[in-house]
Image (cartoon, rainbow, N blue to C red):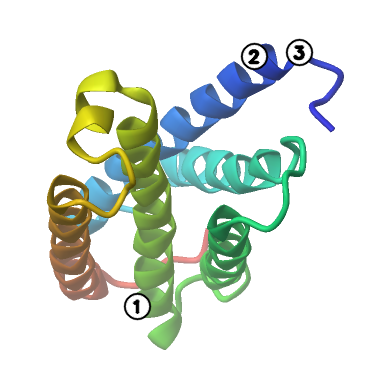
Amino acid sequence: MTLELSLSAFTLLHVIISLAGIGSGFIVVLGLLNSKRLNGWTAIFLTTTVLTSVTGFMFPFEGFKPSYVLGVLSLLVLAVAIYSRYSRHMAGSWRSTYVITATFALYFNCFVAIVQAFLKVPALHALAPNGNEPPFVVAQMLLLALFVWLTYRATKQFRAAPAQIT
């Protein structure tokens, strides 16, 4: 089910949505690091990140793939982030819950972006044709380290800001 688009047009749409989610996600995390809510950017980030996962399930089914597990995990994490942000208004421990789940959702998108880069960019694919060679593993480990640090810092910084109901 590709929304009645050709597979290439649907793939392009999915990539654009994914890149919008990643770009807006980094803006949101930058806001968290500076104790700013950035409500508009947050709405864009959460919406495009949900759409990224949803459209990922619309590609032609070719058997079970790890990407389906990641898509489900991403949607679960996003459900908690959205609930924390909009239903619980980030009050009390929901503030940390929101920061952690929002940054995890961004991490999942970036993780997939690295996987896709190693699959589609010839120079990267030559370095790790099976996706388990050291260059791929190092790239993913650096990404994980970056996001552990970002999550820690954002949680620490954003918790210092007083709660607001929006």
Name the residue located 39 percent from the left edge and 75 percent from the top edge. Answer: 95
- Dots 2, 1 in contact, CB < 8 A: no
Report how far apart the C-alphas of labels 3 and 1 lie in the structure.
41 Å
Q: Quadrant of the N terminus?
A: top right
Q: CA distance from mark 2 to mark 1?
A: 39 Å
The residue under label 3 is 6
Q: Residue at x 72, y 44 (%)?
A: 62
Amino acid, disc 3: Ser
Numbered circle sitting on residue 8: 2
Disc 3: CA contacts within 10 A as few (<14), some (14-19) or many (>=20) = few
Residue 127 in the image, given as x and y percentages of width and height: 17, 35
Query: Mark 3 or mark 1: which comes first in sequence?
Result: 3
Q: Label 3 to label 2, Cα distance in Å?
A: 5 Å
**Badges 3 and 2: C-beta atoms under 8 Å apart?**
yes
Q: Secondary structure at mark 3?
A: loop
* 92 sits left or right of 72 in the view: left
